[in-house]
């Protein structure tokens, strides 16, 4: 990452010409100490983007809000909630 201009900031990598950060989470990937079971793949011409499901994303953002009082995470959770299908029963069970 450093060879292409990214700077390491704790667990993240940032680039001065990008609004986005890159994170390489520790393994096994988990949300609220529960292992993530479903990884989605989006195919692009240059490769794949792997992401967690909207259900796990909602859980992750709720964790950030609950444990660190991260209001931005709560706003992100609402955006994901409004724009995606997810498993409400799984979130309630969790």
Image (tube, rainbow, N blue to C red):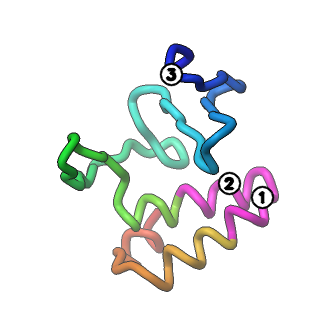
Check disc 3 and report the residue beneath it.
4
Check disc 2 and report the residue beneath it.
64
At mark 3, the secondary structure is helix
Measuring from the top left, give residue 52's x and y in whole percent: 37, 53
User: Which is nearer the N-term, disc 2 or disc 1?
Assistant: 2
Q: What distance separates the C-alpha of mark 3 from that of mark 1? A: 30 Å
Q: Is residue 22 magenta?
A: no
In this orientation, which residue lies closer to the viewer: 40 or 7?
A: 7
Q: Which range of residues does the magenta coloring cover?
A: 60-74
Measuring from the top left, give residue 73's x and y in whole percent: 68, 62
Q: Are marks 2 and 1 in contact (CB under 8 Å)?
A: yes
Check disc 1 and report the residue beneath it.
70
Rendered position, 17 above or below 28: below
Residue occupying the point 59% across, 78% down = 78
Rendered position, 61 above or below 77: above
Measuring from the top left, give residue 8's x and y in whole percent: 65, 22
């Amino acid at each position: 990452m450093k060879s292409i201009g990214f700077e390491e900031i704790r667990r993240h990598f940032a680039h001065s010409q990008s609004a986005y950060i890159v994170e390489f989470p520790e393994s096994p990937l988990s949300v609220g100490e529960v292992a993530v079971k479903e990884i989605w793949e989006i195919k692009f011409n240059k490769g794949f983007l792997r992401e967690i499901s909207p259900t796990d994303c909602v859980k992750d953002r709720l964790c950030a809000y609950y444990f660190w009082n991260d209001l931005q995470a709560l706003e992100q959770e609402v955006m994901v909630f409004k724009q995606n299908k997810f498993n409400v029963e799984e979130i309630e069970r969790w």
